[in-house]
Image (tube, rainbow, N blue to C red):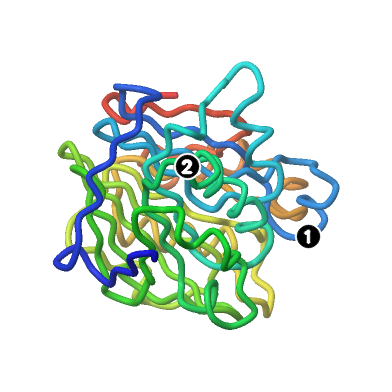
Amino acid sequence: MMACIQDRDSMQVKERGRDSASSQLIFLGTGGARIVVFKQIRASGGIWLSLKGVQIHIDPGPGALVQMTSKPLRLDPTHLSAVVLTHKHLDHSADINVMVEAMTEGGFRRRGLVLAPGDAFDSDPVVFAYLRSYPEAIGVLREGSSFQIGDVAVEAPLRLLHPVENYSLTFRGGGKTISVISDTRYFPDLEKVPEPEDVLILYVVLYQRREVDHLCLEDAKRIIQGRKPRLAILTHFGMSMLRAKPWEQVADLEQELGRPIKAAYDRMRVDLETLEG
């Protein structure tokens, strides 16, 4: 039977990954929304986080396995410590079952943690029932929930405004704090944080605001101004952002705000010690 955990007080997953002793972010894809993902104008494999020897895959969208195992990355999914979904939409979850199978070597090594909102398991689930016993534990994200993976704490500070259940994420370990704000309509609490993060990752689908539950560039500006991270990274670009050339938009934003900001690109690495890529 799987162990279903609610927070880090109830269970600690001790398994560590082995791919890298360094702490880094690797962007396995930077595309968001339907056209960009379905045409693979940008890849859509999510984010690989290596922190204190713990390997975490965030939002394994379509093509995640291919992206991580291809040259030049050659990441080994059997070394994963955890797979985490912000929400169940396909551009974030399409390869979730592949990654769970890989992490657990087809269920022959019961290890690792799977974290996702409740509706990823219960209502029109995206995590298949047959493999839920493969990980060491499955955790259900709720606003304010927290979990422990080795020396890394994972928190879900905010429920986001999106058509399905969706949460922001914060990862803490080795003296570093990395936050992820996934697809959401802007709301003021997105600007608030107890203390500035080392890295803030924003999923910015839109160039200009529309009446949909996604962030636009102006929203990203307000959030960065409010939270003041050491480094902000924009990713998950839709067509309007790509047409606007996100690297140029970010250069202008950097100059205006006086803070380091990057526009992510496929297979981009960021060293979490130096915050350089």
- Residue 139: give x, y in percent of width and height: 36, 66
* Label 1 with label 2: CB-CB less than 8 Å: no
Q: Residues within 10 Å of mark 1 (few under 14, many from 20)?
A: few
Q: How many labels, in total?
A: 2
Q: Quadrant of the N terminus?
A: bottom left
Q: Secondary structure at mark 1?
A: helix
Residue wearing tag 2: 108
Residue at the image position 42 percent from the left and 38 percent from the top: 80
Kind of residue at badge 1: Arg
Name the residue nearer the viewer: 27 or 240.
27
Q: Is 254 left, or right, of 230 in this rendering?
A: right
Q: Residue furthest right?
A: 39
Residue at the image position 43 percent from the left and 69 percent from the top: 167
Label 1 or label 2, whichever comes before in sequence order: 1
Residue at the image position 17 percent from the left and 36 percent from the top: 174
Q: Secondary structure at mark 2?
A: loop
Query: In the rendering, which numbered label is found on residue 34?
Result: 1
Name the residue nearer the viewer: 212 or 43.
43
- Residue 220: give x, y in percent of width and height: 49, 58
Which quadrant would residue 146 be assigned to in this image? bottom left
Kind of residue at badge 2: Phe
Name the residue nearer the viewer: 227 or 41.
41
Give the label, 1 or 2, closer to the camera.
Answer: 2
Asked if 2 appears above or below 72 in the picture, the reply is: below
> In 3D space, how far apart are the residues under numbered discs 1 and 2 (Cα atoms)?
35 Å
Which quadrant would residue 116 be assigned to in this image? bottom left
- Residue 254: give x, y in percent of width and height: 45, 40
